[in-house]
Image: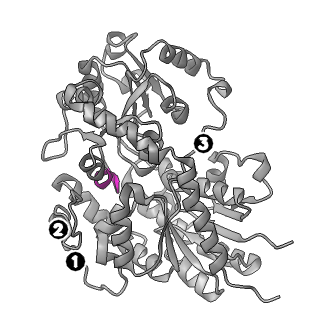
Amino acid sequence: MATPLHVAMLPWSAFGHLMPFFQLSIALAKSGVKVSFISTPKIIQRLPKPPPNLATLINLVEFPLPAFIGNELLPEGAEATVDLPSFDKIQYLKIAYDLLQHPFKQFVAEQSPDWIFCDVLTHWAVKIAQEYEVPLLHFSVFSASMYAFLGPDLLVDNKTKIRQSPESLTVVPEWVKFSSWLALRIFEASGAFDGLYGLNASGISDIDRAANVLYGCQAIAIRSCPEYEGEYLNLFEKIIGKPVIPVGLLTPENVNGRDQITDERWKKIFQWLDEQKPKSVVFVGFGSECKLTRDQVYEMAYGLELSGLPFLWALRKPEWASDDLDALPPGFGDRVHGKGMICIGWAPQLEILGHSSIGGSLFHAGWGSIIETLQFGHCLVVLPFIIDQPLNARVLVEKGLAVEVERSEDGSFSRNEIAKALTQAMVSEEGEKLRVKARKATMNFNNKKLQEDYFVRFVEYLKTNAVKKQE
């Protein structure tokens, strides 16, 4: 009997990266591939348990997060970006993360995997893969449009970057020859430029990390499909000069379902959802990584109230709030009683999105959330904040799948703009085209056969291109 292919997974320590890598691990295990999923102990503890029938093929490998000089700059016990109070602390997490290269090198030497799958920030995996002659693949948790936007700046031999200022990110790149709205607003560009091109405490910029990974890998696997962004997949492949393989959308499955929810609070919320009209409720969720200010949360709340639409809002308690009550405007809960439901903390997102009364979603336009939402055909209202979210939002709006909340030049938004975008997407006559397109999107986003076919081809690529080991 042939030994199964063995893949070592090395995701970055952010749950927006960890979960797609975990979903990829499960899909590979279902295809008979052995996976070693490598992360730190507290992260591994927070991951879902692999299905029992795949337990022998998925090995969750714990490497303690190394200490470093300046370790006190990280909150005690922090291992993932969600544990950090602000974005400026991420640079120190990168220092600790980079030190994982030493136990990982030992792991590769001892285990001799057939493939290493690395994330966009894991530039040090390149030398380890080369030293032990293990093929390296970059798995992207971002859509192809993000890479196409960065373009030639992702080439390692481009020492002089094309983008020299935030303003250079506010125009559609000249190498995008087809119709596109792929550009940042000026209030988005400043933070994006510093985050991508600026030096940080780890000693290497994110754009250089990515360029080194793309230079050293054999191929790039993207959680996407040509039916959604074929032109960007082709453009990225042309720019990078290596195979760019769509692995399908890896749509998460709601295995447990609502019946497994034991929290009484959520049981009551689902009972409330049962009483609402089909496709009438807006789900509002900005995940755990978006650090919203008091003004942003309050304007969002007033906008929901102003819209008059029924809503379910999953809100992570902000750092600035003394308690759950302080996280919302005074009297807000009483005024929307019966019309809206607010849950502070964790939410069973897939179960919510799969409920028949949900018709739309107000969210940040993160790629994983787009996939989760469009598989159910919900209309999208997008309010992007960080990293790839603004670019994802532009693509969605251009495709007629979303309404973006209008903002001032400084990036602020008002309750009126929230209410206007929600009303347009959910109930207005002008939003009907959007609602029809969103429903049609399920033909691709919820097409299991289509997505599985892409994944089967991907697994064949891995088997064909694995280095044959000496007996």
The answer to whether 42 is drawn above or below residue 261 in the figure is: below
In the figure, is residue 408 to the left or right of 341?
left
Along the line of sight, the residue nearer the viewer: 326 or 113? 113
Q: Are marks 2 and 1 in contact (CB under 8 Å)?
A: yes
Q: Are marks 3 and 2 in contact (CB under 8 Å)?
A: no
Question: Which quarter of the rendering shows the C terminus?
Answer: bottom right
State the image quarter where residue 38 is shown: bottom right
The amino acid type, in three-letter code, at marker 2 is Ser
Whether residue 448 is visible, yes or no, is yes
Residue tagged 1: 162
Q: Please give the label number shown on residue 168.
A: 2
Q: x, y percentage for residue 302? A: 25, 23
State the image quarter where residue 109 is shown: bottom right
Identity of the residue drawn at 38% across and 78% down: 240
The amino acid type, in three-letter code, at marker 1 is Ile
Residue tagged 3: 253
Along the line of sight, the residue nearer the viewer: 432 or 188? 432
Q: Secondary structure at mark 1?
A: loop
Whether residue 146 is visible, yes or no, is no
Q: Is residue 102 magenta?
A: no
In the figure, is residue 2 to the left or right of 51?
right
Mark 1: give few (<14), some (14-19) or many (20+) Cα within 10 Å. few
In the figure, is residue 103 to the left or right of 72?
right
Q: Write down the region rendered in magenta.
A: 386-392
Identity of the residue drawn at 48% across and 48% down: 82
Between circles 1 and 3, the one closer to the viewer is 3
Sequence-first tag of 2 and 1 = 1
Q: Are marks 1 and 3 in contact (CB under 8 Å)?
A: no
Identity of the residue drawn at 39% across and 36% down: 439
Q: x, y percentage for residue 9? A: 62, 66
Between circles 3 and 2, the one closer to the viewer is 3
The amino acid type, in three-letter code, at marker 3 is Glu
